[in-house]
Amino acid sequence: MSAVDEKIGAMVLELREQIPQVECIEGCHDCCGPAPCTHWERERMGAPPDPAQGRDDAQPGSCRWLGPSGCTVYEERPMVCRLYGVVEGLACPHQCRPTKGARLAQGAQARIITRYSLAVFMDQLEHMTCVPGEVQR
Ligand code: SF4
Ligand code: SF4
């Protein structure tokens, strides 16, 4: 991991602390689809579990880290998984909300999304590849 990746990691860790826990329905995984993430987050998730140990009811496109008992990387799940039920654009289909009741205030939501968007942009710049000859001069 590069110095930029470490900086992204520090930003992600700081944001994680600001996101309240959602009180989910036990065993629910309805919001678990492909979860985009930064390289730093992906590195912390490690290898996905053996597909043979996966869920019997897994749908095509299910997250590869979803195991028979739910998320196998819960402590290291990506930001999008943490924001479900917490921010307005990612409302839980079952109306689950943070444990303490209210969603984050609009200002706090905007700050988290803006800061994470910056982390994603930094991640893309750090890991983008340029194909020689594609740049027009
Ligand atoms: S946020 Fe909602 S949809 Fe996602 S796991 Fe929790 S209860 Fe299920
Ligand atoms: S990382 Fe975990 S919480 Fe996120 S989509 Fe995959 S199984 Fe669900």
Image: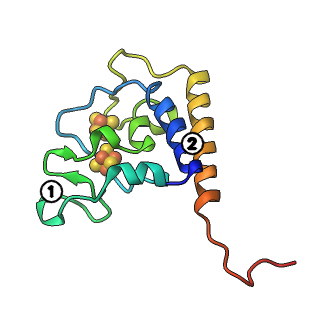
Amino acid under label 1? Arg
User: Dividing the picture into quarters, in which one does residue 65 lie?
Assistant: bottom left
Report if the beta carbon of the residue with label 2 is closer than 8 angstroms to ligand 2.
no
Q: Count of labels shown? A: 2
Decide which of 22, 92 is in the foreground and name it. Answer: 22
The answer to whether any part of residue 31 appears in the image is: no
**Residue at image point 57% right, 40% down:** 116
Q: Quadrant of residue 132?
A: bottom right
Left or right relative to 59: residue 101: right
Which residue occupies the foreground of this view, 6 or 54? 6
Residue designated by label 2 = 7
The label shown at residue 55 is 1
The answer to whether residue 80 of the structure is visible from this angle is yes
Indicate which quadrant contains ligand 1.
Answer: top left
Across and down, in percent, residue 137 comes to 87, 78
- Above or below residue 14? Residue 76 is below
Name the residue furthest bottom: 133
Q: Secondary structure at mark 1?
A: loop
Picture colour scheme: rainbow
Label 1 – label 2 distance at C-alpha: 35 Å
Q: Residue at x 43, y 17 (%)?
A: 102
Disc assigned to residue 137: none
Crowd tier of the residue under label 2, counting other residues whose Cα lies within 10 Å: few below 14, some 14–19, many 20 or above: some
Q: Residue at x 61, y 29 (%)?
A: 111
Seen at 57% across and 49% down, the residue is 3
Badge 2 marks a residue whose secondary structure is: helix
Query: Which comes sooner in the sequence, label 1 or label 2?
Result: 2
Residue 20 x %, y %: 40, 24
Locate residue 45, reporting x and y percent: 33, 50
Q: Residues within 10 Å of mark 1 (few under 14, many from 20)?
A: some
Say left or right for 46 vs 6.
left
Q: Considering only vertical position in the picture, is 51 above or below 45?
A: below
